[in-house]
Image (cartoon, rainbow, N blue to C red):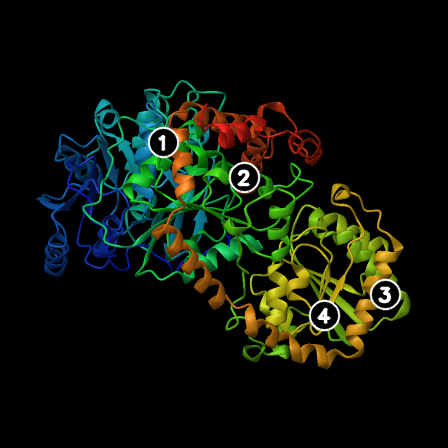
Amino acid sequence: MKEKYNFSLEPGKIKTKCRDYKDNESVISVVIPFYNDKDYIEQSVNSVLNQTFPYYEILIIDDGSKDEESLKKLDEVAKQDTRIKVFHKENEGLAATRDYGASKSEESAKYLMFLDSDDLLEPTFMECAYWTLETNKDAAWAYSDSIGFDADSYTWNKWFDSEKMKKENELVSAAMVRKSDFNAVGGYGLREKAVNEDWNFWLKLMAIGKYPVHMSYYGQWYRRKLSGELKKSKDNKARALEIINETASKITNNVTAIQYPKQDYNYDLLLDKVETIVQPELRGEGRKINLLFIVPWLITGGADRFNLNLVRGLDKDKYNITVLTTEPNKNTLRQEFEEYATVYDLTSFLNQKFWLAFVNYIIKKENINVILNSNSKFGYSILPYLKANNTNIPIIDYVHMEEWYNRNGGYSRYSSMLESVIDRTLVCNENSKNILCDYFSRNKNEIQTVYIGVDEEEFNPEKYNKEEILKKYNIEKDKKFIFSYICRISEQKRPMLLLEIVKKLKEKRNDFKVLVVGDGNLLSKMKAKASNLGLTENIMFLGNIENTEEIYKISDLTINCSIKEGLALTSYESLSMGVPVISSDVGGQKELINEDVGAIVPCMQNEKDIYSEDYKDEEILVYIHAIEKVLSNLDKYKSNCRKRILDKFTIKNMIKEMSKILEETQTNPNEDKINNGKDLLNNLNITKELITLNMMNDKIEYNWECTEYEKKVYGRAYSVNGLNYKHELLKEKLWKIPLWRGFVKVVHKVKGN
């Protein structure tokens, strides 16, 4: 499958400085067959040495290499780490070499990690595979989606299908295998060369009823070369298929894999520890801030860009950052986050009943001393437990906006329910701060505004050529003015209101074109309505565009019709590119957009009517008036825009402010919150039960998210458990569930109970 991916970010290009953990016996034996492979072995070994789980040995099995340079390189690599052991044997081929490596595995090792000498692992692969096999005791092996690279570049993600596996190998050789199951089938067992030995091995396991865990993230890199074992297997196709067919014939039952993400939680006992997991412990950590950052996903929204800018901007000499994501998604920004932080997507490898155990494991493993939660419902649900269990670790949350259509306040309500365990709440605008204090009765001394800002160097109009951009996107300059509408095409952004504005404006003037940039659940409907209204001459749909700065460069005006915002990232970006903004008066928009750089338009629709497309003529006309006012003196407005950003709203300012807050809070945690945590410790089971309640309240939504993931990534167009998860179901049944009514009482009144 072809998709956008940065194939240049190969793991193991350099050996990173890993954290120093106390010694322990090997839990995993990494078996790497080697044969005259001087060009790739170092990178492959580096990708193992960079793993986040430290308790492994690396067994490099030289299969009779004769090339002196390759043997010399192997000696150099072996000296890098005491966990590396090299064995030499006569040439027998891959299967025999892997079996030999398994026979040399330490007795303490429960798992065998098979990795070819030219393939690579993402840093968290072994840790996630270890956890998923420890929590899925009957599964025989764990693998992930993979990246093809080198001679050919592609992403590889296939839904595990045992019937299809009998006819076609859709797995790569890199996987972690339970040693007892490896021994149960006699290992690879082949002594012939180039006969699809890894495919045959998976079939052998399936023949005795064993099944895998399929982790849903890109954890493995499979090197495609013009020559090699795959090429030889194709040349030896007849014999290879003879062996495969014989093994496949022994599989008499359908074999069902465990495949993530999946929803199967149903009031199971919520575990906060997995006894069989070996807990790494640091030797000593100095004065670094070890930040645990909990977020729902890593996608291209404004909140996610803020998160990325924060992770990217914090001083790595002062911070170690671990990111946990808690909702199923393709996580298109994951690679960018991983350049600056360690990332674990809980949904991709772990059952929900073990999530809390993993969080506890990470807190101890990484010596976490600050917790930051933003927009994660699961993150909020575990904060009372975390405060009780770790009273001295301060907790901060960042709220991007209040949503009255989402549980009567959205994350502002979540945050306020849990104020007794949150040291400091950060918001992206003063309006949100006032709502927290006035409506939710928060302590104003614990609320602080930190504007999200914009990268003024990336969003600099001087760096871009207008004519080249117009040509790149095939945009004819047949109109005097170009307006941009850049957002997620969803109810919150009111795209149908934009169409009404364009329709009315066209009645007065026809010298403009609107570029609609983005995707979302209303895009198809928006396109159809634009056509029905006869607006195709004035609207051009460009879809998702990563480099939005190019669109601002060719724009004269940016329009925001949202019914709800915190403070829109697009507004920051537009002004930084010297483009005025006309926006609805929602959230903190007027804190950024003043009369010198655009216009603020009253929002005349109630939030509870977010799904209505019945807009007032008065609101449409106010937009028309604002557009004409800005266009009448466009040069004046443009000249003020970038200065507005440089004076107050840059990313540098945001990073400086966030770093100051994190350091102050870590150094001086709130004593009242510490005492509240101590009181909660006496009611720890209640805090765990409230996490269970949250998971059950979100069960329908989480199931729907899993289904959507399977549709988009694996092409599985079906409804989970026969239910049809439509948007209306979520709107009418899910969003109205009253979350945690008892939660507030427990968190705020537990003292003295």
Q: Amino acid at mark 1?
A: Ala
First-in-chain label (3 vs 2): 3
Q: Amino acid at mark 2?
A: Tyr
First-in-chain label (3 vs 4): 3
Q: Is residue 42 left or right of residue 376?
A: left
Residue 534 image label: none
Q: Is residue 281 left or right of residue 85?
A: right
Q: Which residue is mark 1?
A: 357
| Residue 246 screen position, x and y as percent | 33, 26
Q: Which residue is mark 3?
A: 505
Q: Which residue is mark 4?
A: 598
The reply to whether dot 3 and dot 2 touch (C-beta < 8 Å) is: no
First-in-chain label (1 vs 2): 1
Q: Is residue 534 left or right of residue 229?
A: right
Where disc 2 sits, the SS reads helix
Answer whether residue 386 is visible to the viewer in this image: no
Q: Which residue is mark 2?
A: 709
Q: Nearer the viewer, mark 1 or mark 3?
A: 1
Marks 1/2: CA–CA distance: 25 Å
Marks 3/4: CA–CA distance: 18 Å
Q: Amino acid at mark 4?
A: Gly
